[in-house]
Image (cartoon, rainbow, N blue to C red):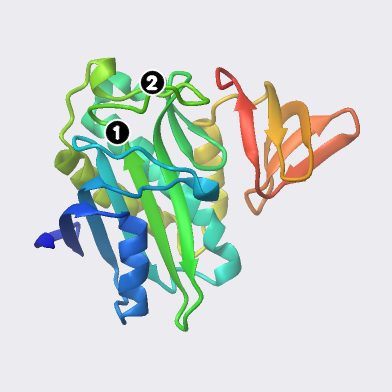
Amino acid sequence: MNREATDLAGVRHIAFERLGSTNAEAQALVRAGERGPLWVTATMQEAGRGRRGKGWVSPPGNLYSSLLLTDPAPPPLAPQLSFVAALALHDAVAECAPQLGPLLKVKWPNDLLLGDAKIAGILIEGESGPPFAAVIGMGVNCASHPPDTPYAATDLASAGAVVAPEHLLGALARAMQTRLAQWDRGQGFAAIRSAWLRRAAGLGTEIHVRLPEREFSGHFEGLDESGRLLVRGEDGITAVTAGEVFGFGQI
């Protein structure tokens, strides 16, 4: 059952004590006729998930949120929302824990790092409609982080910052409004791309890219005009649309 309905930066908000996942709930609401914009949050998730169906450990004390947007941009531009969300997460965490701001970096395609460890993740999912809708799932490790992950993970409390999920959510809602306006349905992606690159982890360093069909290593050169990862290897520059990236502290 939903616990309350409030406003976040002028956007409606439905909070749940317990959900399977906030993204799944938002998608179900879209199918039931909800058009948003709408925030869906949960105190804990029982079936949280990340990219490629990976599980997301979701105990109480962390932030589990999804923002539902109808027709945020032409569907081909919707993947750019991961960069918008990453910047908003960076902004919000830096606002709530300013002492950690210099240590925050964004990692292509969907993570926020604190030092070399993942502290937040993003999952963008679409509903083809009509109308087209995008669900932006954002989870932040405020009080705890999963153990025994294949990559380093951490949380705000472990770094010495006590941040309540509801406080962080308010900052995130404001930051998303600002970054969405900057993005302007994709018309402002150049500014988003530039801001993301200034905060990018490992720019110019050696990284390893894992694709469904192959793996390769090279230097992280930047992003192209559509947000594809540019990696310079022995055969020149490869533009990567989707994949997993390891390096700069990640294993």
Image disc number at residue 108: none
Tell me if mark 1 has few (under 14), some (14-19) or many (20+) residues whose alpha carbon lies within 10 angstroms of its own.
many
Which of disc 2 and disc 1 is earlier in sequence? 1
Query: Given this view, does label 1 or label 2 mark the residue nearer the observer?
Result: 1
The percent position of residue 222, horizontal first and vertical second, equals 67, 36
Count of marks, rendered view: 2
Residue nearer the viewer, 44 or 135: 44
Label 2 amino acid?
Pro
- Is the C terminus in the top left, top right, bottom left or bottom right quadrant? top right
Residue nearer the viewer, 219 or 208: 208
The percent position of residue 61, horizontal first and vertical second, equals 19, 35
Quarter of the view holding residue 189? bottom right
Q: Which residue is mark 1?
A: 93
Quarter of the view holding residue 86? top left
Q: Is residue 187 in view? A: no
Q: Residue at x 38, y 23 (%)?
A: 147
The percent position of residue 108, horizontal first and vertical second, equals 57, 38
